[in-house]
Image: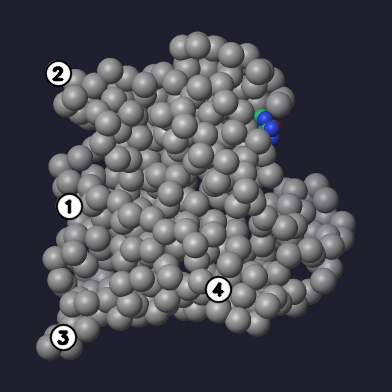
Amino acid sequence: MTIQPVNVGIIGCGNISDIYLQNCTRFPSLRVLACADLMIERAAEKAQKYGVPNAYSVEELLADPAIELVINLTVPQAHGEIGIAALEAGKSVYNEKPLAIDRESAARMLELARTKNLLVGGAPDTFLGAGLQTCRQLIDGGAIGTPVAAHAHIQGRGPEGWHPNPDFFYQPGAGPLFDMGPYYLTALTSLIGPVRRVTGSARISFPERMITSQPLNGTMIKVNTPTHIAAVLDFVSGPVATLVTSFDVLPQRYFGLEIFGTDGTLILPDPNTFGGPVVAHRIGSKEWTEQPIQHAHSENSRGIGVADMAEALRTGRRHRANGDMAYHVLDIMHAIHEASAEGRHIELSSTMEQPAALPVGWSALEEQAA
Ligand SMILES: NC(=O)c1ccc[n+]([C@@H]2O[C@H](COP(=O)([O-])OP(=O)(O)OC[C@H]3O[C@@H](n4cnc5c(N)ncnc54)[C@H](O)[C@@H]3O)[C@@H](O)[C@H]2O)c1
């Protein structure tokens, strides 16, 4: 017997909604019943483009008893409010990253889910892609021995040269850490588990910045959140990682996410993508070797975390891109800023369970047994 599809409503029909709609309308575990947006014409356009039967206001979508799960693709500032409203309406919710801007709204979501027997999920789900699942298989299989350390760095000059409305990137709740950090932190925590404590230093290198993209070319932005953040993270299982996120430097030559073990080094793929390459250097070898990739989902598969969550809703097992992990990532990011402001290490009060690895044969495009 195959699982019954879960009825889904999507709130937020902007840039990222296309790839979700493209994928979620093809996953057999999901049935997309409605789209909603503050701007109803956007919901109508996406509904028509992807054959979704209803274009609703947010209130209409939340009032539709057929919808069991809300995918929340609104801007980060609305993640908490929409997520809480969905849970209060009796629906499970999967939020784009970050889970919320503040810890309080995110914690409220987890609490509501617990008391109402609903699920909370959170992006990114890139760690379920073929590339990072291959890394998981290699690490679990001892390919690099015991993890000792990790490096993660994503640096550049910021989005005001290409993004049409980049102001929000420079306000609290954004900046390079909250914008890009979730990819790196979700990859690392999914691979080596939760973080025990963090410290870091953060600065605003340019208090004002000029937009050079259209249509706002020449407009100045006041920067209200740190834009260069260097952090150190101690994982519960022992490894120490460095994470640098920046909108303040010229492009880096080598983008980087690496895990160093007692017996080898693993170069991970870009955690904002689903595929490879995965490259390893093992003890005794003189070479870097590209590793074979056997898992499904090398292509842009945003939404596989929702498909996995739908299976969990039907079968009662734990879902992988879950609220505890997304909350832990949010807590780490806040703690890094606090550590810098207070000049100390911050012990984290949140934790998470490492999500189960995906079996090699699993694909969200195939029907799953109940
Ligand atoms: N654009 C990307 O490449 C990308 C990639 C990965 C993740 N994300 C994440 O996806 C989310 C959305 O990003 P985007 O680029 O699609 O933004 P966007 O601004 O293009 O779209 C957001 C949409 O949400 C709607 N919205 C805002 N507040 C709302 C509310 N309270 N109720 C209903 N609708 C509301 C807006 O009208 C808009 O249509 C963000 O959390 C972002 O971090 C974006």
Query: How far apart are the alpha carbons under marks 3 and 4?
Result: 35 Å
Q: Nearer the viewer, mark 4 or mark 2?
A: 4
Element class at badge 2: loop
- Compare residues 271 and 344 and report the one nearer the observer: 344
Proximity of marks 4 and 1: CB atoms separated by less than 8 Å? no
Number of other residues with Cα within 10 Å of mark 2, as a class: few under 14, some 14 to 19, many 20 or more: few
Residue 93 percent location from the top left of the image: 49, 32
Give the labeled residue for mark 1.
294
Give the labeled residue for mark 3.
283
Label disc, if present, on residue 1 of the rendered structure: 2
Give the labeled residue for mark 4.
346
Number of other residues with Cα within 10 Å of mark 3, as a class: few under 14, some 14 to 19, many 20 or more: some
Q: Please give left or right for residue 311 compared with residue 241 in the image.
A: left
Residue type indicated by callout 1 = Gln
Residue 44 percent location from the top left of the image: 62, 17
Q: Residue at x 59, y 33 (%)?
A: 84
Proximity of marks 1 and 2: CB atoms separated by less than 8 Å? no
Q: Which of marks 2 and 4 precedes in the sequence?
A: 2
Residue 126 percent location from the top left of the image: 39, 51
Residue type indicated by callout 3 = Ile
Q: Is residue 70 visible?
A: yes
Split into 4 quadrants, where in the image is the C terminus?
A: top left
Q: Which of marks 1 and 3 precedes in the sequence?
A: 3
Q: Nearer the viewer, mark 4 or mark 1?
A: 4
Picture layout, residue 150 above or below residue 119 = below
Q: Residue at x 19, y 60 (%)?
A: 137
